[in-house]
Image: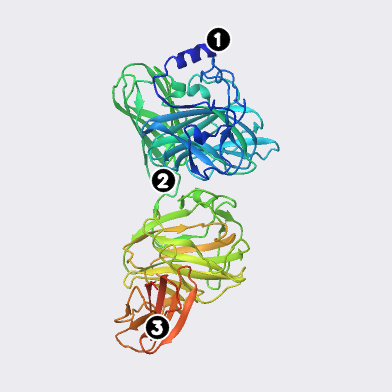
Amino acid sequence: MRKIYFLLTCLISVTSFGQIFSEDFNYADNALLSANGWTAFSGGGTAAVDVGASNGLTYTGYSGTTGFTGAVVGNAARLDNNGEDINKNFSASVTSGSLYYTFLVNVASGDAGYFAGLLSSGTTFSNRVYVKPSATTGKINFGLSNTSTSVYATTPTDFDLNTTYLIIVKYDVTTTGNASMWIKAAGIPATEAAAGAPEVTTSGTVPASASGFFLRQYATTQNITVDGIRIYSTWFNAAPCSLVLNAETRSCDATTLSLDTYTTTIPFTGGGTATYTLSATTGTISGDNPSTSATGNIIISGVTEGTNNTLTISGGCNIVKTITAPECKPVNTLPFTDSFPYTVGNSLNGEQKWSILNTGDNIVTATGNLSYTGITSSGNLITFGGAGAESKTLFTNTTTGTINARMLVSVTDITGITTDLTGAYFAILTDNASTLTNARLWVRKNGTQIQYGIGAATTDAVWDTTLYNTGTTQYLVLGYDFANNQVFLCVNPTIGGTASPTALYTPTTAISGIGGFVFRQDSATLTPTALSIDELTIDTSLNFTLGNDSFSQIDGLKLYPNPVKGGTLYVETALNNNVHVTIYDIVGKQVLNTTVTNNAVNVSELTSGVYVVTVTEEGKTTSKKLMITN
């Protein structure tokens, strides 16, 4: 105790170093936090967050007037319902450096969810602390994430219910938001290095700012008490070190289908004033020596891609820097093929041909194959459904001719889809695989069957008119023709034969280049919960021949007025022959199907909104957007 007391005395004596935020919740019994400097940003007034009656948490060395907080043990915040969420802003936003936030927590019960953390601005979260019931009955686990998808240790530590713990989080205020969390049952580590390995580390693309702290209620079964929040720019407000590490850069030494290595460069200032010892969990340290150089770069090389690293500096002061590993994955050449010959149960995002685009449940490899006449299946297949992470792959950028993605697809379960005729896109040909704005392959429930479609935006879809039974395999070809600016879909073409697209779509803006492909999961109520894909090929040629008129545009096609107001749409072409007109609403539901003989289409029964009009004349088909403003 004498050693801890000396440490605390030192820490308390330097409160001017970098205190950002302080809250002990010592308000009147049952007082609302919204009446005491906190602001409701969601569910205001519904099951409002309040404090208890003498429910303040105790932790030796942290709480109480002789503890780190220097505060009496009074009341604490109660998060015990599904309702109001609140935040309290800092006096000024933090836009650089690191933040260390600590608080006491006692969990009596609750479902999985995040309950506290940092805001970057308004109601945009920077960093979130999670809790969930453990696989061990009567225990809980704590997690940390920069997103709404939780991150827990691979083997999370079990903690007890109805027990007070000290949570310590380090958060780097950068766009990558590197963060680490420690959970302590007793004692206060004198330094970050002395705290040992964190329970969990995380990162993620976030705004490079932090403006406040939030508390969240998310379940009626939630019963969490929070007390003694402190936020500083240093570890427990210790004297800042003259040595400052700035944001690091990470570069891949190579990008191949093998595991590559990467190099981290960490600029520093304020060196040359003390002797430092540097160590890393992996890799070789080189570059400038902060013991002798005032400024320079610390370089860590030879670290395997996908392996996070930690730089620890001791001596003149103690600094720990977490480095999140980059992916060093190649841009594939065309034709790109993948029969998914990976270990069953592994995430597709862990394979060298694929990268993660989002967070959540991963697309995984499963045993077995789908079959189709003319295609020899090998390896395994992949399965996904519901919400979760997307998988992306990059390939040689293509700007002319046609490009297509071909795959075998089987949907075996649509019971989770709650709405008929509401689609979800699950595969995308895109410009660079970081945006999802180009050619998309859709699926939707139609009664007890399924239907496939195409589009180029979140609500644009033209559907193949054929319905398919669950449990059957379709050969789907999603493509784009640069010359005619048309997305096309072929369903079940004969290998080596001739086929025409079963759906065509003309994007509003022509696609200038395609160099990426994405498998996408939408939500548990839109994406089929059992979607299997096999034998993916991306290429500029096809294993069948498209009919000569597949991409022929209709000469002189005009749709007017657009927007339509008054109930009549006019369709003109250079030939002015009879044309067939089909109109779809924004969810892809066919709302009009007619043959036009006098150029006029009666759309008076259609409500105001955005539609897709498909016009066919002498085997040529073109799709255009239409706005109706009745």
> Which residue occupies 51% across, 74% down?
492
Q: Amino acid at mark 3?
A: Val
Q: Residue at x 48, y 68 (%)?
A: 587
Which residue corresponds to mark 3? 601
Helix, strand or loop status at disc 2: loop
Q: Could you say which disc has been placed on residue 34 in the image?
A: none
Rounded to the nearest angstrom, the CA distance separating label 2 from label 1 is: 50 Å
Tag 3, which secondary structure? strand
Quarter of the rendering containing residue 137: top right
Q: Which residue is mark 2?
A: 328
Of marks 2 and 3, which one's residue comes earlier in the chain?
A: 2
Is 22 located above or below residue 110 in the figure? above
Residue 344 percent coordinates (x, y) = 59, 52
Query: Which image quadrant: the C terminus?
Result: bottom left
Could you tell me if the residues under marks 2 and 1 are in contact, i.e. CB atoms within 8 Å?
no
When the figure is inspected, residue 307 is found, relative to residue 59, above or below; the finding is below
Front residue of 89/480: it is 89
Check disc 1 and give the amino acid type: Arg
Considering depth in this image, is 82 or 424 the residue closer to the camera? 82
Residue depth check, mark 2 versus mark 1: number of the one nearer the observer: 1
Q: Nearer the observer, disc 2 or disc 3?
A: 3
Q: Residue at x 46, y 81 (%)?
A: 593
Residue extending farthest top: 2
Q: Quadrant of the N terminus?
A: top right
Instruction: Report the front residue among 233 and 545.
Output: 233
Label 1: element kind:
helix
What residue is pinned by disc 1?
2
Q: Earlier in the sequence, mark 3 or mark 1?
A: 1
Which one is in front, 140 or 410? 140
For disc 2, the neighbor class at 10 Å (few under 14, some 14 to 19, many from 20) is many
Q: Is residue 376 visible?
A: no
